[in-house]
Amino acid sequence: MIYFKTKGIVIYKKRIKENDANVYILTKKNGIKKIYAQGLYQIKSKNLPLIQIGNYLQIFGLKEGENLKLISVLPLKTRFLYFKKYPYLYLWSFSLLTKINLLETDDFLWKIYLHLERFIIKKNFPHYLIFHLLRILGFEPDLLRCFRCQRKLKKEIYFDGKKALFCGYCKKAAYQKISYWEWLGAIKIKSKNKIPERVPKFLKTIIKTYFKNLKRLS
């Protein structure tokens, strides 16, 4: 058994037995780590007030094989203010991470969760976050090429109503035509610098379909 320390953001707690818990931490480089916290829910526990969803902590513990056990934590950043302002969206953004198997932490994803207060106030943050989670996991919807022939999309763009865009050569009669300007607005979601002011309906459908498929694979 050896000592370890790491920094991470609390994304989930699962109570086990009467007073113990498994705490799930998003770390900067190594994805999500599960740490066993013995006695976390005891009345005299010093760690419980700090181990709250969204808090950024310095964590000290013991490692035995692949198992991690919590000793103590120090607060680096607490998030109570933003939880009160946006409780549903706040908790939803962390619950997303519990639905995927994240073994590494992308720098952009880390920036979002470390500075969540800057992103969560934006109108289209939910779709933006899901799109970039898909990208990081290698399941990004292709918005630039025809799903069938892989031609670059230009001004003849069609949507199959579910998950993909097609060029004028590969379209079917039932497909919905997407205006060129609407498509230009949609691909802005790929930016790492700015959340788009508008997310077209067809793009929302694509994101939803891809994320459902991802959860089935997890």
Image: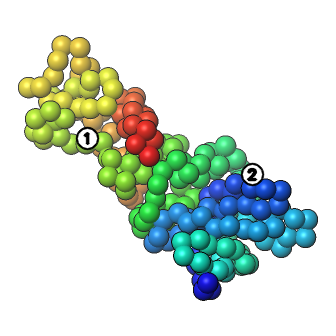
Left or right: 56, with 40 as reference point: left
| Residue 2 image point, x, y percent | 60, 86
Q: Is residue 217 above or below residue 22?
A: above
Q: Nearer the viewer, residue 183 or 28?
A: 28
The residue labelled by disc 1 is: 143
Instruction: Tell me the quarter of the picture where residue 5 sits.
Output: bottom right
Q: Is residue 70 above or below residue 204?
A: below
Q: Residue at x 26, y 23 (%)?
A: 160
Type of the residue with mark 1: Leu
Contact (Cβ within 8 Å) of mark 2 with mark 1: no
Element carrying mark 1: loop
Q: Looking at the image, which residue sits at the far right?
A: 43
Left or right: 11, with 131 as reference point: right
Left or right: 70, with 204 as reference point: right
Q: Label 1: few (<14), some or many (≥20) within 10 Å?
A: many
| Residue 55 image point, x, y percent | 67, 65
Dot label at residue 183: none
Query: Quarter holding the N terminus?
Result: bottom right
Q: Nearer the viewer, residue 130 or 29?
A: 29
Mark 2–mark 1 Cα distance, whole angstroms, equals 36 Å
The residue labelled by disc 2 is: 84
Q: Residue at x 76, y 68 (%)?
A: 38
Instruction: Tell me the quarter of the picture where residue 213 sits.
Output: top left
Please tell me which of labels 2 and 1 falls first in the chain: 2
Q: Residue at x 44, y 63 (%)?
A: 103
Q: Looking at the image, which residue sits at the far top?
A: 173
Q: Nearer the viewer, residue 124 or 12?
A: 12
| Residue 181 image point, x, y percent | 26, 34
Element carrying mark 2: helix
